[in-house]
Amino acid sequence: GESVGLHLPTLSVQEGDNSIINCAYSNSASDYFIWYKQESGKGPQFIIDIRSNMDKRQGQRVTVLLNKTVKHLSLQIAATQPGDSAVYFCARRGSQGNLIFGKGTKLSVKP
Amino acid sequence: DGGITQSPKYLFRKEGQNVTLSCEQNLNHDAMYWYRQDPGQGLRLIYYSQIVNDFQKGDIAEGYSVSREKKESFPLTVTSAQKNPTAFYLCASSPLGQGRSYSYNSPLHFGNGTRLTVT
């Protein structure tokens, strides 16, 4: 069946270090992936997306890597800041345009 | 500013009562979605609509109903038939591409949610 999962439920990093959040998926037909950031009490906020014809995409301080061979997606945050503390979700586009979400990883940044 | 507005932010109801959550968007998006989020969980799809006067069930539609009378609005009713209604409810929207297929380069835009507590 379809599923999108996260390797770790929590991640704690030191301010200034790089963060890597991982995600695995099972549906090899998946062709569009998105990372969202959700702060407490708020809706998910779009970070970055990637299509399956790409291996890597960079944004401001963030990079998404897609490894289709092992069905693995990662989000890298450079120079992590306290404001990056949140829950991060990976999601893939379903056949009807909806998003199928993983359970999320809680990122905590230590000052 | 364009965006999605969900109201109210917090909602309290007694068991056995129906309750309607509001979602309005001014992004001119065709598609709208309702997700439910439980503590420590990902988002699960309740209902979605790709066009006015049409909507489809998502993964957990039982105990919920929706309407789409206007492009801008997609209210969700949590009925008394929903066994565990206490949750955080999120509304989202996205544009659709030509031929009513979804646009690959358009992620869903979310509102800031309504937290419903039923006692």
Image: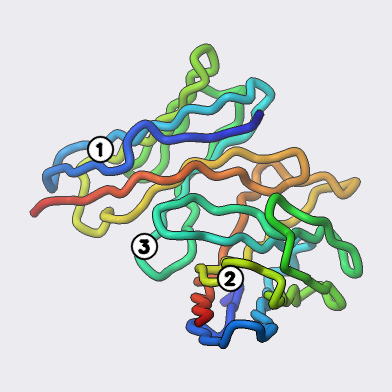
| N-term mark: 1 or 3 | 1
Mark 1–mark 3 distance (CA, rounded to whole Å)? 17 Å
Mark 2 surroundings: few (<14), some (14-19) or many (≥20) residues within 10 A: many
Residue placed under numbered mark 1 in the picture: A19
Q: In which quadrant is the N terminus of chain A drawn?
A: top right
Say which chain tag 3 marks. Answer: A
Residue placed under numbered mark 3 in the picture: A39
- Please name the residue shown 28% across and 54% down the image: A84
Left or right placement of residue B93 versus residue B69 in this view: left
Left or right placement of residue A53 versus residue B71 in this view: left
Place residue B26 in its image quadrant.
bottom right
Q: Nearer the viewer, mark 1 or mark 3?
A: 3
Residue A78 image label: none
Residue placed under numbered mark 2 in the picture: B85
In this rendering, is residue A95 above or below A108?
Answer: above
Where does the image place residue B9, in percent across and percent down from the top left? 50, 82
Mark 3 surroundings: few (<14), some (14-19) or many (≥20) residues within 10 A: some
